[in-house]
Every structure is written in structure tokens, then in C-alpha cells.
Image: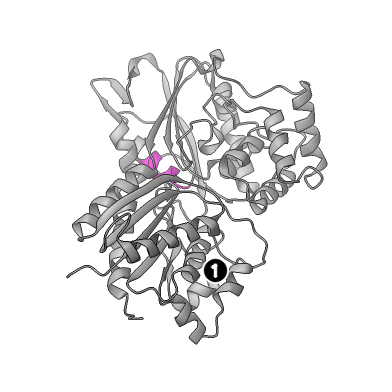
Amino acid sequence: MKTADSGLRRDALAILKAGLEAADAGNAVRRNFSCSGGFLRAGTARIALKEFDRIFLIGAGKASVQMAAAVIRVLPCRLSGGLVVTKRGHGGGGLRGIPVIGAGHPIPDEAGLAASQQVRELLMEMNARDLLIVTISGGASALLAAPAAPVTLAEKQQTTDLLLRAGANIAELNAVRKHLSALKGGLLAALAYPATVVSLLLSDVIGDPIDVIGSGPTAPDPTTFGDALAVLETYGLIELIPKAVCERLLQGAAGTVAETPKPGDPQFQNVQNIIVGSNRLAMEAATKKSRALGYRTLILSSTMQGETREVAQVHAQILREVQASGHPARPPACILSGGETTVTVRGKGKGGRNQEFALAAASEIAGLKDSLVLSAGTDGTDGPTDAAGAIATGETVGRATALGLEAAAHLRANDSYPFFDALGDLIRTGPTGTNVMDIHLMLAGARRT
């Protein structure tokens, strides 16, 4: 549908596309992983391949297939085995010689459970003459579901769902999941020991901490059972979580269940953890594109977090300030931010944090001319929907009212998807092959064409 802000929409989507292309998971691996002269270069590490009899590959995450494919193209020899697990629909064309399993995300399922069992069996066969390459991207925590006894998959599912609905951030969520897992929190690397492990990480978390990305399966875990309990207490969930979950965490805090391996543990002496891509890279590419289009551009932050609608309202007020005073950038301006906000679910509607971001912003910029807010997940999916996010402009609320849609009511119900679907303002990219959190952008003032 052609509107008065069609030019802004076109520009916003072009800027988003540039950010997604820069964060491509395959490219991220190739920049940090290569092989020549019998040596493997992984980040700053140089590894002699003659030291190993076998090479294995394990991948987990929404971008794991693309990352694994890049690894396979680099290696000069055939892999001895491996397994990749990804979100259903993100598998692409599969992989040469390595099985790919599609599993549930963000709530783990039986397919992820079966994949994790295969991974554990593979790890327990490894020795000091083996090299294990691991590719981890966003979603790995849920996709590689390995509940620690006596916790069941259903109990872990219920706990994850309660934390998500309560608005727990990724670090809090992973502190709990690591202590309910047989693979997270460094336990994957511990099972592989004494094999050499090279872990390639595509960061989808604020600040890129290696112990939080994918719940840190190959990284020392600084969190404790006590920390996991504190998260549940913060959100008032102690009485709501399954009994087996509570008992395991309490036993761990009391010292009767072994902690996850900590920094300094000798099981990590043969492990290299390498961050190959992050939200900052996508931000820089989006900046370059917006400037090429003629916008004065400013990055607010690549570490945005907090309650989605509150962060969106702040962004909307910045957009109003740009239009009113030319600060912090004079129109035509593009203001960018990245990160990962959280939604406290109170309604029964359908949507995701990026669609909610756009909906919350829409009410704040209603009637503001030549103004646009876009929010999208770089993986191409936003919550349990087929959209990556949505676009809101100064015209959005008025257009919705004409269709009998009340923006405030949809926001209260966490029902952003049908709102933007009716307006034709959902962003549908399909699976992108990457996952470096979210991109938010604001455009103020029509540029000269």
C-alpha cells in the first residue's frame, strides 16, 4: 500500500538489509577461520592439523547450519562425524556429510532432546588426538536440550516458559538453564576433554560474554546454583516451578550436586572460544548504508536492553526531539540502536518483542510527519510468528483507527502481530542465516532524491 511515507519505508528496509548482509553467519566464520599449509587459523590461534587423527563438528543455534557449512568448506579433509541442530525451518539445504536436526525454539522439544543425547554420545568417544569444532549461535540453549536428572524435558519447558513470560533477560534465563543442563555451562567442553575444542560463537547477547552465548557450552561458568535460585526468587517463581527443578537447584546450592565447571578448571586448557560476529558489525554496516542514502547517522548503542515498550517510548521521544530541535542529529537523520529487549507478557495476544517495540513507538509518534521507527530481529523471526518485526510511522495510528483497530488495546493484550498484519507493516524476511540480536532504527525527515 502506497502511503505518504513510502520513501522512508523503502530506505529503512534497505538499511536493515545492509545490516543483515554484514552479519551473515557464513561470512562471519570465514573472516575468523581458515586453513593453509597444514595449519588451521581460528581467531588468533594456529593449530597444526597433523596433531589430530579425527575432526568432528557440532553446531547448535538458528545460524548453525550456515556456520557449519562455512567450516566444512574451509577444512581440507573430510570430517569424521558430527551433528548440527537448528530451529525448524532454518536448515536451508542441509550439509554435506553431517546430519541436521530441526528442533523447537524458544521452548525445547523432543527433537532437541534426541539431538543432545547424540551429541553426548559423540563427545564421550573423543580423545586427545581429536579436534572438535563447535559452532554456536542464538537459540542454542533451547535447541540443544539436555535436562540434568531428575529434571524432565517437560519440567524444563515449563520453567523456560515461566521465565520468558516473567520478562527475564537472557543472562538470567541462561543462569537457570545452565544449572538444569547436562551440556550447558561448560559441560560440553568437559565431556569432550581431553580433545582440543575450537568454538566459533555468533553473539546474540549484550556485551558478548562467552559464558552466556548459547548458555556457554564450551565456556567456564561463573554463575552458581545460588544465582539460579536468586533469579527465580526475583521473579516470584519459586512456588510455580516444577518440584524437581526446585529440588535440583536447592541441592546444588547446598553442595550435594556438582557445580558447573568454573574459570581455571583444567578441562578448558585445550579450548578456544572465538567470537566471530556481533550486533556491532550489523550496526556499522547499517550506518554505512544510511549515510550513502543521504542521512545524518548516529548509533545510540548496540547494547540496548530493558522492558520493550519502555525502550521503544524512549526511542520515540528521541525521534520527536530530532524533529523539533535537530538534536542529537539534524534531519534527514537515521538513529540506530541494537540489543535485545524483553517483554513481560500480560495479555494473550500474538506477537514478538520487535513488533511490540514498533507498536509502543507508534502511539508516541502519532501524527509526526516524515517519521519512522523500525524494529526487527536479525534472525528473521520475532517470537512465535513468521515476521522479523514491524514498521511504524506517524501515520500508523490513524491508519489503524480507520480500520477499527485500537493501538492501545492491542498493546495491552501483547497483540502486535494482527495489528501490523492488517496494516501490511510486518517485516517478513524469512530465516536470514544469522542471529545477532535486534536492530532498531528511526528515520526523521525525508531525504532529497
Q: Residue at x 32, y 57 (%)?
A: 327
Q: Amino acid at mark 1?
A: Ser
363 vs 82, nearest the viewer: 363
Decide whether residue 66 is among the magenta residues: yes
Residue 372, picture quadrant: bottom left
Residue 111: give x, y in percent of width and height. Answer: 61, 47
Q: Is residue 374 visible?
A: yes
Residue 198: give x, y in percent of width and height. Answer: 42, 26
Q: Which residue is mark 1?
A: 416
Quadrant where the C terminus sits is: bottom left
Decide whether residue 421 is among the magenta residues: no
Main SS category, magenta section: helix
Residue 125: give x, y in percent of width and height. Answer: 56, 22
User: Tag count in the figure?
Assistant: 1
Left or right: residue 18 compared with residue 395: left
Magenta stretch: give its range. Answer: 62-69
Left or right: residue 248 compared with residue 388: right
Residue 203: give x, y in percent of width and height. Answer: 44, 39
135 vs 58, nearest the viewer: 135
